[in-house]
């Protein structure tokens, strides 16, 4: 019993301040996303005849509740974004339709729109990202990250809600894709699995803490980046460029470029030297 008391005391001794209010509810955020998904793609994830207005009311109630929880957890003033967010749902739906179209156009294995919407992890990740992005723009703290991390856990695709992603965006396969907070991505950009759009380094303030400044790549229109390539820092990949697989880039690339690995100038015999 004394041992249990000692363990209890050790666990109760925090090395960081405890939140003064409860954390936002991940289960409620997941329900929000189920509702949003059914509204954005009616009939694909539920019965098409279900009452749209009732789902909108439920979504609004959940969002109001979770937005308050997030602002109180962060000791910020309450925000009431639910109605403004719901007014943005038609635009979110339009943007997602372009993403679905881009995936269909870029993958010969896709048998049709229905398969892409129901099965492709990229679309699930983009639903979460585009919802989270709107909430971030409406000033809701924390909840956008909760929403994108739900998709990250389910798909392996990590898109920060702070990133700006244009229309007709597609990710093929998707596992291991990382898109950092200050990325700017244009229209008709396609990424393959394992692509990282990350920060090369970051500045520190006088207390040694990271400074949140633009530090991730700018990807212009009509760019393709193939699997397992890494682009780091505030560099620009010019429009209509192709970045081959397994490339490491920390410099600007002009428009209409083609960046590939150098061909080997010497071969190996009998497996020696590999």
Image (cartoon, rainbow, N blue to C red):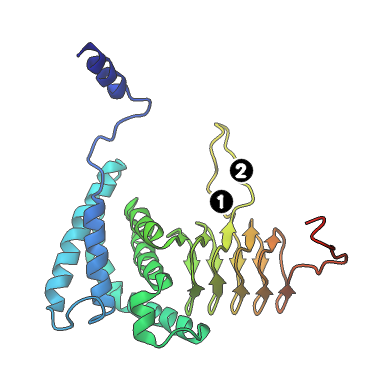
**Residue depicted at x 60% and y 46%:** 202
As drawn, is 17 to the left or to the right of 80? right
What is the quadrant of residue 220 in the picture?
bottom right
Asked if one can make out residue 84 in the rendered structure from this viewpoint, the answer is no
Q: Quadrant of the N terminus?
A: top left
**Residue depicted at x 34% and y 84%:** 114
Q: Secondary structure at mark 1?
A: loop
Q: Quadrant of the C terminus?
A: bottom right
Give percent across and percent down for residue 39: 24, 76
Give percent across and percent down for residue 64: 20, 57
Q: Residues within 10 Å of mark 2 (few under 14, many from 20)?
A: few
As drawn, is 100 to the left or to the right of 189? left
**Residue depicted at x 73% and y 71%:** 259
What is the quadrant of residue 148 in the picture?
bottom left
Q: Circle 2 is placed at which residue position?
A: 203
Q: Residues within 10 Å of mark 1 (few under 14, many from 20)?
A: few
Residue 265 versus residue 235: which sits nearer the camera? 265
As drawn, is 152 to the left or to the right of 192? left
Cβ–Cβ under 8 Å for marks 2 and 1: yes
Q: Circle 1 is placed at which residue position?
A: 213
Q: Secondary structure at mark 2?
A: loop
Give percent across and percent down for residue 149: 38, 55
As drawn, is 217 to the left or to the right of 53? right
State whether residue 266 is above or below residue 98. Answer: above
State whether residue 41 is above or below residue 111. Answer: above
């Amino acid at each position: 019993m004394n041992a249990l008391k000692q363990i209890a005391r050790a666990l109760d001794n925090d090395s960081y301040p405890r939140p003064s209010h409860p954390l936002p509810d991940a289960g409620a955020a997941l329900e929000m996303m189920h509702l949003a998904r059914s509204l954005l793609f009616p009939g694909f994830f539920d019965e098409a005849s279900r009452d749209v207005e009732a789902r909108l009311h439920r979504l609004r109630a959940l969002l109001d509740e979770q937005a308050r929880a997030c602002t109180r957890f962060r000791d910020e003033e309450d925000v009431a974004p639910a109605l403004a967010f719901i007014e943005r749902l038609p635009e979110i739906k339009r943007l997602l339709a372009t993403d679905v179209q881009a995936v269909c156009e870029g993958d010969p294995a896709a048998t049709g729109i229905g398969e892409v919407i129901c099965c492709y992890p990229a679309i699930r990740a983009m639903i979460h990202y585009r919802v989270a992005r709107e909430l971030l723009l409406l000033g809701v703290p924390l909840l956008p990250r909760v929403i994108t991390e739900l998709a990250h856990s389910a798909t392996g695709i990590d898109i920060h809600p702070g990133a700006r992603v244009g229309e007709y965006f597609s990710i093929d396969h998707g596992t291991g894709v990382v898109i950092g907070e200050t990325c700017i991505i244009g229209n008709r950009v396609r990424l393959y699995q394992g692509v990282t759009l990350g920060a090369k380094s970051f500045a520190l303030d006088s207390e040694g803490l990271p400074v949140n400044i633009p530090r991730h790549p700018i990807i212009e229109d009509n760019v393709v980046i193939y699997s397992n390539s890494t682009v780091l820092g505030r560099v620009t990949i010019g429009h209509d460029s192709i970045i081959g697989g397994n490339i490491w880039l920390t410099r600007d690339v002009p428009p209409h470029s083609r960046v590939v690995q150098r061909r080997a100038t010497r071969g190996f015999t009998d497996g020696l030297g590999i």
